[in-house]
Image (cartoon, rainbow, N blue to C red):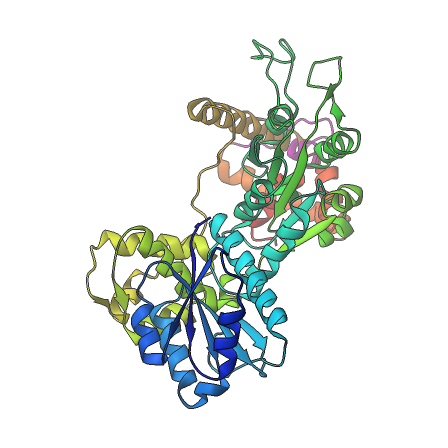
């Protein structure tokens, strides 16, 4: 958090001067009063200038052009507008404050908004949208508690930043924040990572290893992409959350832990509960409080602040032409903040200077780029070890899938005993039979994927991949 807080107050009606005069002395907010809008714009280049206070009615003729210019020149600055209005066409305003309020109420409104801004800043969350302010307010409310929180939203919107903000603003901040991506680790390996194992629990378990739940004792465990966790593991996690105890793999003695759980997902877990893919009891246990982040395209007021923050961090004093800015605001950003950051990184590689044109922006925007190129990271495990274990497990899973599918195809199209009547001499033949088997199975169970996976004896995620492979979605 930045220690010094500065607000620029623009003279107008007496109300502005009354607010400034009544502000308690000795606070951490320094207020500077300027005579008019032109002088205010000249002050907005100061790095520490975070807030502007303006009486809209006193400058009504020139206020809208001023606000538009301010949004373009200083997108990281928060604007407090004293007015009786609640919206102004084609202008982004952070905080409307009713000018009919008492001085004390106006002061409290400003203080509350500044608290939200600095919470977001301290968490590395950049933007001015109502969605982010609502998320920060919820963080303020629930961070001091041990309540489980479910953070939802598309990939690349900053769910882990919200989780870290919850941890850093909680009594557990001096203990570990441990995170794991449930989608990047096979089910069998995920269990051992979460719960740990005893020596000799399985082949390769040469020593006792504590799980992430133990590493997060007295701290916070962040379970990213919780919707990808298999039902069997969901049941074990639920019991650990409810009883605060669990037994490591191969162990006999229960381990007690004090851990706060924060989970995140880009899936519709309510729909997964209805379809039977996610346990209802675990969903309600994790989602006591829900913090939802929306797509960047739905909060375009965050785009320019994000760009300014990124370029400022890299000490690049470049700007964009009006046409380029419009393109950046209208582009859909399917990869959300992650894609915007990727775009800016590619821009900096070109060593830009001066004003960036629309043509330059258009040439760098790749609408077909995969938004999430991040590698899976498992906390508390050496990078090399993680890579070897994931590759080894993936190869084992692939081999098992091929063996199981061959057996199923043999049973279905062979003599009923698992023996193939026709030799499968080519990969194309195997794939053709596999596709046919999946089609017929789905037809038998009226398209119910869960029943189809059970009938085939494979996992639902395996079935899902094969449905995509054969365009059966």
Quick check: 356 above or below 195?
A: below
Residue drawn 34% across the image and 68% down it: 44
Q: Nearer the viewer, residue 290 or 390?
A: 290
The C terminus: image quadrant: bottom right
Q: Nearer the viewer, residue 119 or 220?
A: 119
x and y, in percent, of residue 223 in the image: 61, 38
Q: Is residue 420 magenta?
A: yes
Can residue 335 be seen by looking at this rendering?
no
Q: Nearer the viewer, residue 280 or 163?
A: 163
Residue drawn 56% across the image and 32% down it: 174
Residue drawn 70% across the image and 14% down it: 250
Q: Nearer the viewer, residue 402 or 278?
A: 278
Quick check: 108 above or below 283?
A: below
| Span colored in magenta | 408-425
Q: Is residue 332 left or right of residue 289?
A: left
Q: Which quadrant holds residue 324?
A: bottom left
x and y, in percent, of residue 61 in the image: 42, 90
Q: Is residue 269 magenta?
A: no
């Amino acid at each position: 958090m930045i220690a010094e807080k500065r607000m620029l107050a623009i003279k107008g009606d007496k109300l502005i001067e009354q607010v400034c005069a009544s502000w308690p002395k000795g606070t951490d907010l320094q207020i500077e009063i300027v005579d008019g809008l032109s002088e205010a714009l000249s002050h907005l280049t100061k790095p520490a200038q975070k807030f502007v206070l303006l009486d809209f009615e006193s400058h009504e003729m020139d206020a809208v052009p001023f606000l538009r210019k301010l949004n373009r020149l200083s997108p990281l600055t928060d604007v407090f507008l004293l007015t009786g209005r609640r919206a102004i066409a084609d202008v982004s305003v952070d905080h409307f404050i009713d000018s009919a309020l008492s001085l004390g109420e106006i002061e409290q409104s400003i203080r509350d908004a500044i608290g939200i801004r600095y919470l977001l800043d301290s968490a590395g969350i950049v933007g001015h949208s109502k969605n982010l302010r609502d998320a920060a307010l919820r963080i303020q409310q629930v961070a001091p508690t041990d309540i489980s929180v479910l953070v939802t939203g598309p990939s690349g919107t900053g769910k882990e930043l919200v989780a870290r903000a919850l941890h850093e603003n909680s009594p557990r901040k001096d203990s570990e924040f441990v995170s794991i991506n449930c989608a990047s680790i096979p089910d069998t390996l995920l269990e051992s990572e979460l719960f740990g194992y005893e020596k000799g629990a399985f082949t390769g378990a040469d020593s006792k290893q504590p799980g992430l739940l133990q590493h997060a004792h007295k701290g916070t465990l962040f379970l990213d992409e919780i919707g990808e966790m298999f039902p069997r593991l969901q049941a074990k996690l639920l019991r650990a959350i409810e009883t605060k105890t669990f037994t490591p793999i191969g162990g006999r003695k229960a381990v007690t832990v004090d851990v706060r759980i924060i989970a995140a997902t880009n899936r519709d877990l309510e729909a997964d509960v209805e379809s039977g893919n996610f346990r209802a009891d675990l969903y309600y246990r994790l989602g006591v409080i829900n913090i939802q982040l929306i797509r960047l395209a739905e909060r375009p007021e965050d785009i320019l602040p994000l760009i300014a923050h990124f370029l400022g961090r890299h000490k690049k004093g470049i700007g964009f032409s009006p046409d380029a800015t419009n393109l950046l605001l209208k582009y859909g950003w399917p990869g959300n903040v992650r894609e915007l950051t990727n775009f800016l990184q590619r821009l900096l590689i070109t060593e830009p200077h001066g004003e960036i044109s629309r043509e330059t922006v258009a040439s760098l925007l790749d609408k077909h780029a995969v938004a999430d190129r991040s590698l899976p990271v498992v906390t508390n495990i050496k990078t090399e070890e993680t890579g070897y274990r994931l590759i080894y497990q993936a190869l084992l899973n692939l081999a098992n899938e091929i063996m199981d599918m061959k057996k199923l195809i043999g049973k279905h199209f062979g003599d009923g005993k698992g023996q193939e009547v026709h030799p499968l001499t080519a990969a194309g033949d195997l794939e053709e039979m596999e596709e046919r088997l999946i089609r017929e199975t789905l037809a038998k169970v009226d398209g119910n994927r869960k029943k189809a996976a059970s009938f085939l004896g494979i996992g639902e995620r395996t079935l899902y991949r094969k449905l995509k492979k054969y365009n059966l979605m």
